[in-house]
Image (cartoon, rainbow, N blue to C red):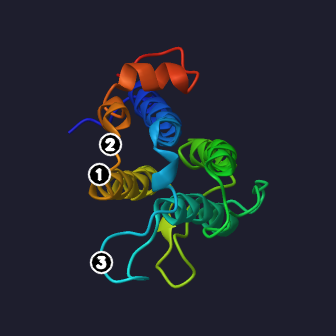
Amino acid sequence: MALPSHAALAEIRDSLLETYASNDAMNQLILSHLDRRAWRAQPPGEKGSGRTIAAIFAHLHNTRLKWLRLSARHLKRPPALDPDRCTMKQAAAAHRKSAAQCLRMLSDALSAAPNRRVSKFTRDGWMPTWPAGGTMFAYMFSHEAHHRGQILMLAHQLGYRAHKAMYGIWHWEKLWKQAGLTTRPR
């Protein structure tokens, strides 16, 4: 089996980076269409048994900060979000900042440069360290996709319709543009 060419590998890397850039556009879309009353509404079930939507968005941002701290110490991290006090506006701004830094981290991690600074991905201090690369991207993207699903399901369970966001996260061409990309999904 022949190894992929440098051009083919560069295209895969660029596609992964573009996909991650659109990742935050998905989060911003949900934040822009979410009913404000859903932000701190208690999840169904026993009190204290689940996260509010605000807490889930704070978790996403704060997890990004942990990845940056553990895998790319050289990159500046924005402040953490308080899950009990952050507003939707604060969450949107924080997500833009942490997404930009995670994109920088991934760009370095997926680089073929021999002097790249991000060579390992540490998800948490107690988890095994992985080599930085495609699996790192997949883990980061799927973590956020999982929680986006939770957020949309929770909004629905609480009686707040989020159809524009729910369907909008599948309009990748629009998301690419919102992320400031000049390419299309490829």
Residue wearing tag 1: 156
Earlier sequence position, callout 3 versus callout 2? 3
Residue wearing tag 3: 45
Report the residue at 27% width, 58% height from top: 157
Residue 15 percent across, percent down from the top left: 43, 30
Residue type at the position of mark 2: Arg
Report the residue at 60% width, 43% height from top: 103
Q: CA distance from mark 1 to mark 3?
A: 14 Å
Residue 21 lies left or right of residue 78; in this view the side is left
Q: Are marks 1 and 3 in contact (CB under 8 Å)?
A: no
Q: Are marks 2 and 1 in contact (CB under 8 Å)?
A: yes
Q: Can I make out residue 142 in this image? A: yes
- Check disc 1 and report its element: helix, strand or loop: helix
User: How would you rate the neighbour count of disc 2 (Cα within 10 Å): few for under 14, some for 14-19, many for 20 or more?
Assistant: some
Earlier sequence position, callout 2 versus callout 1? 1
Residue type at the position of mark 1: His
Residue wearing tag 2: 161
Determine whether 161 is above or below 56 in the image.
above
Report the residue at 68% width, 47% height from top: 101
Determine whether 85 is above or below 114 in the image.
below
Residue type at the position of mark 3: Gly
In the rendered view of the protein, which quadrant contains the C terminus? top left
Residue 116 lies left or right of residue 12; in this view the side is right
Earlier sequence position, callout 1 versus callout 3? 3
